[in-house]
Image: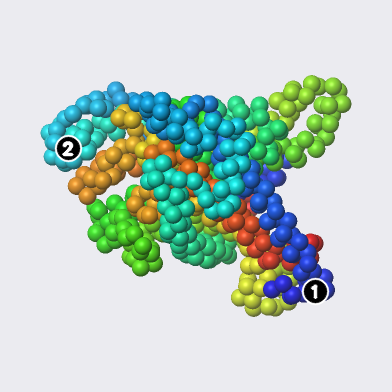
């Protein structure tokens, strides 16, 4: 899951593609459907889970690391909490953090784009997780730190794609025409250029989302979570990892959930990319 | 390789390549200086008092003052940075707070261990992904290609700790019990003395990197196979093996080296999580512990080490790209 977005090709932006049509075409692909299904299942678990969990996220239900506790479907974890309930409670953190990261990245992309292009190359010289760790070492693992660290390190990658995709569009006649009739600059950006770079942007956004989820979960797995003690899938893996031999469920459930979520967003991203590049259209026509 | 004639008939200008390499090294050094400023700013110059953050709420004024003195916190920021950076150049990265030892002594062995792990992963994943990518392109849209495409897509999406934990569940603790779940390297020992114990960490890193390189290699190879010169070579009646080896592969490798470098450098971040999973005594695991202990000098030194690795790998990739791309070589 590195900084690659090999699917974005220049010819993507030269055809104008209404977003609605792009998403509709992406949804016709089997992989997008499967991806969407996976993501929806995990979202449902994250949102509905806390309400249907048989126990609270921090309730003591029986002997620690036991598989045979009445009422605990998947047994108990390292301090005797119900694994299934904790799993159902744990999805929300990742969801909320993921969305917040997306907002930070999206917002700062517009504000900082040109000025910071050089500084971004420097940020790109770091593995993303390392920058987040450096920030955590300094200010501690609070939600704002994690969101800003992951969001701001995601931003340069998105910004790069936006810039690359915008450059050929800026050269085109309709932009020159808009300039000639005196359309204000920000309106040109919003209504002429932005719609034309939307498809590579969507592809990049879904790639980045997949990766941001991975980084957030990895940080929790390393023990740096926003709220120690609270249920959180990454943290659950870390807590129960030591007892893996006797009680695998505490690790397997959250690992499977994170895996399905990232594979789901990955499949959606690939579906959008294929629809945007017209790969399957070409093959269908041939 | 350098004195092979270029496509224009004349010998490639070797001086151009050396100039290019020197320029790229200077650029790399510049990036490292900028990175060191970022690392320094992020760890020491942020609002708040690092001394208090390190010692916690119960610190006495005397111990706070002593630590500030030790960290040179009472001096101007620029002077702090220069002291730190000059020390770093001389191989003196300060003293670890937690271990009360010089950082360089603490990390020396770990750097070697991590380098070995990365080397193993690279040596396996690079040829493997070039091979798989090429065959996927060659057998485009056939079952092998479709299967590879889906498998790489799935593995590319999985965070490496998910892959690592899944491998442990599969091979060590729950399904099979054939490989050790942790890599124990005794103090003074070397990872290559325990080949069985490094299988799983290496496999995790290979699975994390290979998908990207396979995808790029395939895309690049597909493009090359459709090019005029491959068509020409085939029409000349060259055997398909020769067409692939002499005409298609070298040209497809150019863009791939860039991606390999980015991904190997990305491994430098991936090892943090992987070493933590397998309790592997490398710099990644050390970074995690240093962050947990707020051991700022160690965090700074490790951040610089990982960033340097990143820069060096990118440099090597640029040089390799130039070497396999005759067009670029003669343009220098």
Depth order, front residue of B251/B101 = B101
Quadrant location of the N terminus of chain B in the rendered image? bottom right
Q: Residue at x 52, y 63 (%)?
A: B126
Q: Residue at x 73, y 27 (%)?
A: A189
Left or right: A117 as drawn, with respect to B85: right
The answer to whether any part of residue B146 appears in the image is: no
Left or right: B13 as drawn, with respect to A259: right
Depth order, front residue of B332/B77 = B77
For mark 2, name the chain.
A
Left or right: A184 as drawn, with respect to B115: right
Asked where in the image residue A57 lies, by quadrant, the reply is top left
* Place of residue B241 in the rendered image (x, y in percent of width and height, measured from the top left): 61, 75
* Place of residue B200 in the rendered image (x, y in percent of width and height, measured from the top left): 36, 58
Characterize the local packing of mark 1: few (<14), some (14-19) or many (20 or more) Cα atoms within 10 angstroms: few
Residue B11 got which mark? 1
Residue matched to label 2: A64
For mark 1, name the chain.
B
Quadrant location of the C terminus of chain B in the rendered image? bottom right
B41 in relation to B182, above or below: above
Secondary structure at numbered mark 1: loop
A267 in relation to B12, above or below: above
* Place of residue A217 in the rendered image (x, y in percent of width and height, measured from the top left): 41, 38
Q: Residue at x 35, y 26 (%)?
A: B58
Asked where in the image residue A126 lies, by quadrant, the reply is top right
Q: Residue at x 81, y 22 (%)?
A: A183
């Amino acid at each position: 899951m590195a900084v690659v977005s090999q699917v974005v090709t220049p010819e993507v932006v030269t055809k104008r593609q209404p977003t609605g049509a792009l998403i509709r075409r992406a949804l016709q692909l089997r992989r997008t459907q499967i991806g969407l299904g996976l993501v929806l299942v995990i979202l449902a678990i994250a949102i509905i889970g806390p309400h249907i969990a048989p126990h609270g996220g921090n309730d003591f239900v029986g002997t620690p690391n036991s598989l045979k506790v009445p009422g605990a479907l998947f047994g108990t974890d390292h301090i005797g909490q119900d694994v299934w309930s904790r799993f159902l409670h744990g999805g929300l953190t990742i969801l909320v953090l993921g969305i917040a990261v997306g907002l930070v990245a999206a917002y700062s992309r517009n504000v900082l784009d040109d000025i910071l292009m050089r500084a971004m190359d420097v940020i790109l010289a770091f593995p993303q997780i390392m920058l987040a760790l450096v920030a955590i070492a300094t200010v501690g693992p609070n939600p704002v730190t994690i969101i800003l660290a992951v969001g701001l390190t995601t931003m340069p990658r998105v910004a790069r794609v936006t810039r690359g995709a915008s450059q050929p569009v800026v050269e085109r006649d309709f932009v020159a025409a808009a300039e000639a009739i005196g359309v204000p600059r920000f309106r040109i950006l919003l209504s002429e250029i932005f719609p034309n770079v939307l498809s590579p942007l969507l592809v990049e956004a879904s790639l980045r989302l997949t990766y941001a989820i991975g980084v957030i979960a990895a940080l929790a797995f390393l023990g740096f979570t926003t709220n120690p003690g609270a249920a959180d899938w990454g943290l659950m893996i870390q807590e129960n990892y030591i007892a893996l031999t006797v009680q695998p469920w505490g690790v397997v459930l959250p690992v499977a959930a994170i895996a399905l979520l990232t594979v789901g967003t990955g499949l959606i991203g690939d579906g959008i990319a294929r629809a945007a590049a017209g790969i399957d259209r070409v093959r269908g026509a041939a | 390789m350098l004195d092979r004639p270029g496509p224009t008939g004349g010998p490639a200008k070797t001086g151009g390549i050396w100039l290019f390499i020197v320029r790229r090294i200077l650029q790399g050094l510049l990036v490292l200086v900028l990175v060191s400023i970022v690392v320094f700013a992020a760890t020491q110059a942020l609002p708040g008092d690092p001394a208090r953050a390190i010692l916690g709420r119960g610190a006495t004024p005397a111990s706070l003052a002593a630590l500030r003195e030790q960290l040179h916190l009472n001096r101007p920021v620029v002077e702090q940075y220069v002291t730190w950076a000059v020390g770093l150049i001389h191989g003196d990265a300060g003293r670890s707070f937690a271990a009360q030892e010089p950082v360089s002594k603490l990390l020396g062995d770990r750097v070697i261990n991590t380098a070995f792990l990365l080397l193993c992963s690279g040596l396996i994943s690079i040829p493997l992904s070039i091979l798989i990518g090429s065959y996927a392109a060659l057998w485009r849209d056939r079952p092998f290609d479709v299967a590879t495409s889906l498998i790489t897509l799935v593995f590319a999406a999985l965070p490496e700790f998910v892959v690592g934990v899944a491998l442990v569940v599969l091979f060590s603790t729950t399904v099979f019990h054939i490989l050790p779940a942790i890599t124990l390297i005794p103090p003074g020992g070397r990872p290559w003395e325990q080949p069985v114990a490094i299988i799983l960490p290496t496999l995790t890193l290979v699975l994390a990197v290979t998908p990207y390189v396979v995808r790029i290699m395939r895309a690049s190879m597909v493009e090359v196979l459709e090019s005029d010169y491959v068509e020409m070579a085939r029409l000349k009646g060259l055997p398909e093996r020769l067409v692939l080896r002499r005409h298609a592969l070298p040209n497809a490798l150019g863009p791939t080296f860039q991606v390999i470098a980015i991904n190997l450098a990305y491994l430098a971040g991936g090892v943090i999580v992987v070493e933590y999973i397998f309790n592997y005594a490398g710099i990644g695991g050390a970074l995690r512990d240093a962050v947990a202990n707020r051991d700022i000098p160690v965090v700074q030194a490790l951040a610089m080490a990982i960033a340097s690795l990143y820069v060096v790998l990118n440099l090597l990739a640029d040089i390799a790209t130039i070497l396999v791309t005759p067009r670029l070589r003669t343009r220098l």
